[in-house]
Amino acid sequence: ILWRRVAGGLTQGQQEQFAMPFLAALGSRQHTGPARGPKGSHEAAERWRLLGSLERLTSKRKTSIGEAALEGELDSATLWTLGRLGARVPAHGPLNSQVAVEAAEGWARRLLAHYAEGGEEMANFALVHLTRKTGDRHRDVSPELREAVIAWLEARGASPRSVELVRTGGAQRVAFKRREA
């Protein structure tokens, strides 16, 4: 958890080196994967989230990690990771390390097909990040896919803000709940 939280402050080289053990497991194509462990394993979930936090990895590496995530069971941690790896608007990483728009579109289409009947709430998060409008024609997904995601989100009662991020973009707001004394 600590490494995931400080990942934004690491250089690209540090992030690449940090990810090496997970990337080696990806290359071996083991069913346990880079971050998979026993089903429901907290450690496996945190490893996936760590990989999703490494925004300075190369586009090629992020695409490999995303494809590995899609090969396994899609739980909330792998969906979060997929959304962050393919995010059209990075939290801290440079634009030149984003996954190609074609990869993000492919992932979004696979999620739409996988969750056609509903399911995991974190799929909303992933789809919003994968298809969020930026106003940059090199980063934005196709208008047809964006409309399909908007319809999917609305059919599942997603928040108006989620729909707005896909439809028009804008800054992501973080809300903090105030503790009552």
Image: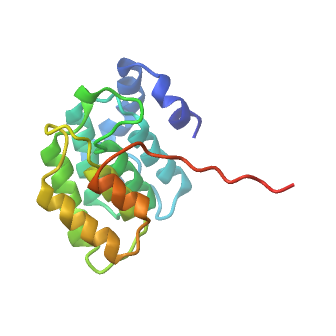
Q: How is the image coloured?
A: rainbow
Please tell me which residue is depicted at 46% across the width and 40% down the height of the picture: 50
Residue at the image position 16 percent from the left and 60 percent from the top: 145
Residue 3 visible in the shown view: yes
Work out whether 161 lies above or below 96: below
- Does 73 appear above or below 61? below
Who is closer to the viewer here, 55 or 72?
55
- Report the side of 134 relative to 73 (left or right): left
The x, y position of residue 116, in whole percent, is 25, 76
Q: In what quadrant of the picture does the N terminus appear? A: top right
Where residue 78 appears, as percent x and y from the top left, is 38, 55
Quarter of the picture holding the C terminus: bottom right
Quadrant in the rendering for residue 74: bottom left
Query: Residue 112's quadrant in the figure?
Result: bottom left
Specify whether 116 is left or right of 163.
left
Answer with left or right where residue 74 lies relative to residue 133: right
Residue 165 placement (x, y as % from top left)? 35, 52
Establish if 6 lies above or below 26. Answer: above
| Number of numbered labels in the structure image | 0
In percent of width and height, residue 90 lies at: 35, 36
